[in-house]
Image: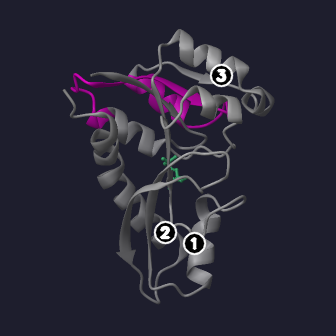
Amino acid sequence: MSYRIAILASGSGSNAENIIKYFSHSEQLFFPLIISNKPEAFVHKRAENLKIPSVTFSREDFSKGTKVIELLNENNIDCIVLAGFLLKIPENIIQSFPDRIINIHPALLPKYGGKGMYGDKVHQAVVAAHETESGISIHYVNEKYDEGNIIFQAKCPLTREDTAETVAQKVHALEYEHYPKVIDMIWGKRV
Ligand code: GRF
């Protein structure tokens, strides 16, 4: 069984690059398309270097979903991986890809999730609450922000010296290590 997977990213795209490189010799999982909502996002530069087409849709087009679904279908996309994608996924996209969309959240859900909890805001909140650990949550995407079934979590210990920046570094390290493996666990390695 092989799957064609689109990556959606709004920012730097370091997870997108890490995933694409991890699967560059895979004969099962292919990553032929990156979609963003920001034309200036660094993920486009990474896509260019990786020789993978990247497309931008406006916030409005994303919320309607139709054009995005059209592009996904034209590219025979089976699954979607969100990697630092900040917009809500509309219902019609979710219904077109049932149980085929996953997201990574940079904290231990259900804590520090929901609308407005993204990027550094998550890490700042974790530090402000003097948490002794943080981590990552990989979950299916449903109609509510960060509330789909959790597939995998990994933790990292925090110290009193940690800042939002050092927490982000620890969390990124976990993301790089685990996100590709979890994608492989869900959609790869099947005959
Ligand atoms: C990651 O920490 C991801 O969990 C969060 O946004 C960050 C994106 O980083 N949702 P990058 O764009 O992959 O470098």
Q: Which residue is mark 2?
A: 108
Residue at position x 42%, y 86% in the image = 159
Residue at position x 46%, y 87% in the image = 161
State how far apart marks 3 and 2 are (Cα).
Answer: 30 Å
Task: Give the number of the disc on residue 68.
Answer: 3
Which of the two residues, 41 or 64, is positioned nearer the viewer here? 64
State how far apart marks 3 and 1 are (Cα).
Answer: 30 Å
Q: Is residue 178 left or right of residue 136?
A: left
Circle 3 residues within 10 Å: few <14, some 14–19, many ≥20: some
- Tell me the kind of residue under disc 3: Val
Residue 180 x %, y %: 32, 44
Residue 84 x %, y %: 55, 47
Residue at position x 66%, y 39% in the image = 89
Residue 94 x %, y %: 61, 34
Q: Which residue is mark 1?
A: 111
- Tell me the kind of residue under disc 1: Lys
Q: Secondary structure at mark 3?
A: helix
Magenta run includes residue 36: yes
State how far apart marks 2 and 1 are (Cα).
Answer: 6 Å
Pick whichever of labels 3 and 1 is earlier in the sequence.
3
Residue 162 x %, y %: 47, 81
Direction top: furthest residue: 74
Whether the residue under disc 1 has CB within 8 Å of ligand 1: no
Residue at position x 61%, y 37% in the image = 41
Whether the residue under disc 3 has CB within 8 Å of ligand 1: no
Q: Which residues are magenta?
A: 21-50
How was this image coloured?
A: one colour
